[in-house]
Amino acid sequence: MEENMYSVRSANSEDCEAIMSLVMELAVHVKCEHEVKIKADNMVGYLLYYFTYSPWVGKKAFMEDFYVKPEHRNKGIGTELLKSAVKVFLDTHCNSMEWAVRWWNTVAVEFYKQKGAINLTETEQFHILRLTEEAMQNLLTKRTEKMVNSNGDDGRILEEFQM
């Protein structure tokens, strides 16, 4: 990476418009621009993360978004962004970090594997699932009752929709 051309730093409130521009650019890249609900320059990339907890490993980080503009790729910027985030994770005692990658984004998968990432889809056969806001609302309107059958077995679940 060329000296002093780029800098990695934490974002502040003045960066919101530039970050939203990058978020939209990422959404277009992954063909999901219709899913961006918030609309907003000199930023060329960003990495968005949050902390979570697992009873098996303890504190961990989840990388929600990671994007570098195409014209600024292959200059070490992505690696520096990732290293900056990893330093924060280690300094705050995270035991691991996780993220999701679109199935077709093989370039990103290879980038992460080169950094030492393990593809849990291959090794652990995990599926990542999501409840949308609508699905969560629908779940709240369901009533689940545990039924006891005539044999005294306590095993069937009956779901009724409340009207």
Image (cartoon, rainbow, N blue to C red):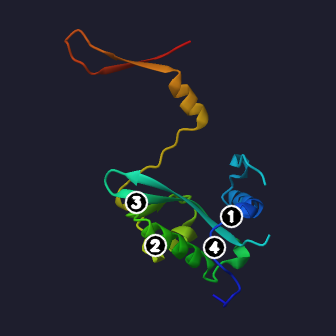
Q: Are marks 4 and 2 in contact (CB under 8 Å)?
A: no
Rounded to the nearest angstrom, the CA distance separating label 1 from label 2 is 30 Å
- The three-letter code of the residue at mark 1 reads Asn
Q: Secondary structure at mark 2?
A: helix
Rounded to the nearest angstrom, the CA distance separating label 4 from label 1 is 9 Å
- The three-letter code of the residue at mark 2 reads Lys
Please name the residue that numbered disc 2 is placed on.
113
Please name the residue that numbered disc 3 is placed on.
120
Foreground residue among 83 and 91 = 91
Please name the residue that numbered disc 4 is placed on.
9
Rounded to the nearest angstrom, the CA distance separating label 1 from label 3 is 33 Å
In this rendering, the answer to whether 144 lies above or below 71 is: above
How would you rate the neighbour count of disc 2 (Cα within 10 Å): few for under 14, some for 14-19, many for 20 or more? Answer: few
Q: Which x, y percent locates residue 120?
A: 40, 60
Q: Which x, y percent locates residue 36?
A: 71, 49
Q: Is residue 7 left or right of residue 136?
A: right
Q: Earlier in the sequence, mark 2 or mark 3?
A: 2
Q: Secondary structure at mark 1?
A: loop
Location of the C terminus by quadrant is top right
- The residue that appears at 47% across and 77% down in the rendered structure is 114
